[in-house]
Amino acid sequence: MVALGNPAQALDRRSRAGARAPRRRGGAVAYVFLIPWLIGVIGITLGPMLASLYLSFTDYRLGSTPSWVGAANYVRLFTQDDRFIASAGVTARYVLVSVPLQLVFALAIAVLLDRGVRGLAIYRSIYYLPSLLGSSVAVAVLWRQIFSSQGLVVQVADWFGITMGGWIADPAHALDTLIVLNVWTFGSPMVIFLAGLRQIPNDLVEAARVDGAGALRRFWSVILPLLSPVVFFNLVLQLIGAFQAFTPAYIISSGTGGPADSTLFYSLYLFQSGFQAFNMGYASAMAWILFIVIGAFTAVNFIASKYWVHYET
C-alpha cells in the first residue's frame, strides 16, 4: 500500500526546497568572489606572519639554512643590544611627543574651520595636502634641506640675529625635526575632527550658551565629550602610524639613524638588521616585539576608552 501523504505538506516542502536553491547558488558565488581575498590573507598576510614567527626563534641569514636557537634572539635584544634599547627610546619619545601635539593642533584647526569661514573647501584641501605628502621621500628630502646647516631655518634665524646650527646634524635636535614633520601632517586627523564637529547637534551648544557657558566651557563640557569617539579613533590611528614611522628617519639620516643614533627609529633599526646585516631571524624577533607593543597600546586604549569616550544612545 502506497502512502500518498498530505498534498499541502508536499507542496510546502517543494516550495522551501525551491527557495533554498537560489540561496545555495548565491552562497557559492559569494565564495568564488572571496577566493582572491582568502588567497591574499593566507598567502600575503597570515603565511608570512607565521614564517616570521618561526624565523624569530632561529639564527637565519639570507642564503643560509635557519637553525633553531629558541629565545636567544629575544634575550640578546634585551640584554646585549644597546642599539635596540636606543631605538626603542627614540621611538617612544617620538610617539609620546608627536602624536599628542599633532592631535591638539589638528583639533584646534578643525574648531577654527568649523566656525564658518569662507572658502572652507580650499582651506581643508590646503591643510590636508601635507598629509598626502608627509611620508613621501620628496618631502623628507625637502625637510632635510630646510633644517640643514645651510637651510631655510638657519637663514631666517640669522636674519633675526639668532645663531643656530643645522638641526639635522645636531643630536640634541635631529629628532625634533621629525616631530615637527609629523605634526605638520595634521591634515588627515583634522579632516576627521572637522567631520565629527559637523555631527554635533547645534541645539546642545546653544542650550549651553543660553545657560551662560562661555566658549571654553562649551568646548570642554559639551563639544569635547560628544567628539570623544572621534578623538579616540584618531588617537589609535596616529599611535599605530607613529610606531611604524620609517621613511622620514631613513631619508633625513641617510639610512644611518644618526647623528649618534638620535633618529634611530625602531623600524629603521629593524630594516638595518634585516636588509643590511641580512640577519632575518633577529629582525623577525624585532618585528614581533613591535607587533606586541602596538597591540598592547591599542588594547590599553580600548580598555581606557570606556572611562572617557562617550557614545550617544
Image: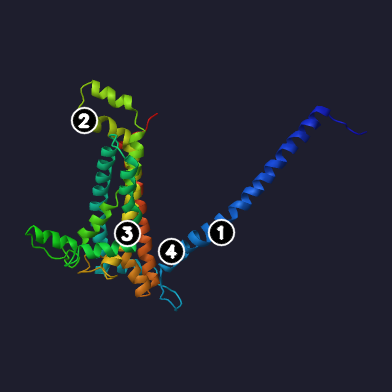
Mark-to-mark CA distance, 1 and 2: 54 Å
Instruction: Using the image as rendered, state which of residue 94 and residue 278 is in the foreground.
Output: 94
Under circle 4, the secondary element is helix
Mark-to-mark CA distance, 4 and 2: 53 Å
Q: Residue under circle 2? A: 215
Under circle 2, the secondary element is helix
**In which image quadrant can residue 243 be found?**
bottom left
Instruction: Using the image as rendered, state which of residue 37 and residue 112 is in the foreground.
Output: 112
Write the residue at 31% across / 48% down. Answer: 126
Residue extending farthest to the front is: 119
Q: Residue under circle 4? A: 53
Query: Image check: 56 left or right of 76?
Result: right
Asked if residue 13 is positioned above or below residue 103 in the image, the reply reads: above
Q: Are marks 3 and 2 in contact (CB under 8 Å)?
A: no
Residue extending farthest to the right is: 1
Under circle 3, the secondary element is loop
Q: Residue under circle 3? A: 245
Q: Residue under circle 1? A: 39
Q: Position of residue 132 (x, y in %)?
A: 35, 54
Q: Position of residue 78 (x, y in %)?
A: 28, 65
Give the label, 1 or 2, closer to the camera: 2
Write the residue at 21% across / 25% down. Answer: 213
